[in-house]
Amino acid sequence: MKQKDLAIIIVICVLAGIVSLIVAHLVFATPKDRQQKVEVVEAISTDFPIPDNKYFNTNSINPTQLIRIADNSNQTPFNTTNQ
């Protein structure tokens, strides 16, 4: 290998390094660009406010009660037959 060939290889490596640095700065985000704003959430507390007496009182309707519309004496619903 001649002295001239070695100089050309070194120049090409330096130019390739400079081009790769320029492309890397254009492609990858800088730390300044990576900053993102997020919501601040308030801390969860163990205090639970007392529910409104308008809705939660002894005269309110209990939605967990069993509702019976009529007496269900039908032993074969949907007209099914025993096989």
Image (cartoon, helix red, strand yellow):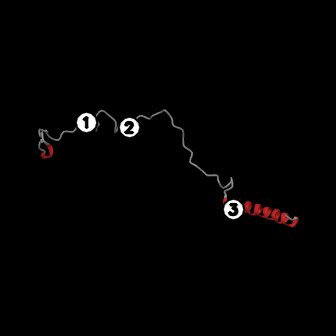
Residue 26 tag number:
3
Q: Which residue is mark 1?
A: 65
> What kind of element bears circle 2?
loop
Left or right: residue 82 versus residue 4 is: left
Query: Looking at the picture, which amino acid does disc 2 mark?
Result: Asp
Residue 42 sits above or below residue 16 on the image = above
- Name the residue: 79% across, 65% down: 12
Instruction: Give the mark nearer the N terminus: 1 vs 2.
Output: 2
Query: Looking at the picture, which amino acid does disc 1 mark?
Result: Gln
Instruction: Give the mark nearer the N terminus: 1 vs 3.
Output: 3
Query: Looking at the picture, which amino acid does disc 3 mark?
Result: Leu
Q: Nearer the viewer, residue 68 or 34?
A: 34
Instruction: Give the mark nearer the N terminus: 3 vs 2.
Output: 3
Mark 3 nearby-residue class (10 Å; few <14, some 14–19, many ≥20): few
Judge depth for marks 3 and 2 and give the one in front. 3
Q: Nearer the viewer, residue 59 or 18?
A: 18
Q: Which residue is mark 2?
A: 52
